[in-house]
Image: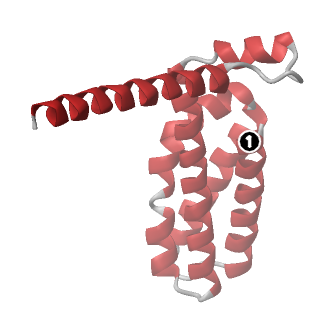
Amino acid sequence: MRHFNRLIIVVGISLMALVGCNKAEKSATQTSPSENSSPEAVAKTNTKTDSEKANTSTTKTEFDGLLGVITNTKVAVEARNFAKAKEEFGKFEDFWSKVEDGVKSKSPSAYKEIEDKSDELKAALKTAAPNKEKVLAALQSLNKNISSVAKS
């Protein structure tokens, strides 16, 4: 029985060593650049900081949120449910405030257009009887501008 216990311990240690070696080998192969990567591309990829990567994904999330607000507002306007449209568009500023500085520095003209259209939509949705066609046209313009900035 004593020999059996020793054998179990030796087998366990051997298995852990094999698993540990295998993981180190995978890690080394996963981090090496592909043969087709240029040195410039590899350097550019390696210079992105963790905060830049997180900022990019956060910004994408915010742009997706903006586009979602526009879509939900459009659905409500098409159904002539202007109270719901006003409620949905009320969420726009939450997302916009997180990306507007970046948009302003990246594309001042798009920033101005987005600001103007969002102000136009807020005013239109506050009226007693909003003009459906004008609201839909403003939403389409807003969607186009935000989509173009999000891609750049």
| Foreground residue among 84 and 13 | 13
| Foreground residue among 56 and 95 | 56
Q: Residue at x 57, y 71 (%)?
A: 73
Q: Please tell me in which quadrant of the rendered image residue 108 appears.
A: top right
Name the quarter where the C terminus is drawn: top right
| Foreground residue among 83 and 149 | 149
Percent position of residue 23, x then y: 50, 28
Percent position of residue 145, x then y: 75, 50
How crowded pointer 1 is (Cα within 10 Å; few <14, some 14-19, many 20+) is rated as some
- Colour convention: secondary structure
Judged from this view, the residue extending furthest toward the bottom is 79
In this image, 57 relative to 29: left or right?
left
Q: Residue at x 68, y 47 (%)?
A: 114
Percent position of residue 77, x then y: 60, 80
**What residue would you read off at disc 1?**
149
Q: Residue at x 43, y 70 (%)?
A: 87
Q: Is residue 119 visible?
A: no
In this image, 10 relative to 50: left or right?
left
Percent position of residue 40, x then y: 83, 11
In this image, 5 relative to 120: left or right?
left
Q: Secondary structure at mark 1?
A: helix
Q: Is residue 130 above or below residue 109?
A: below
**Tally of marks:** 1
As shown in the figure, which amino acid type bears the numbered disc 1? Val
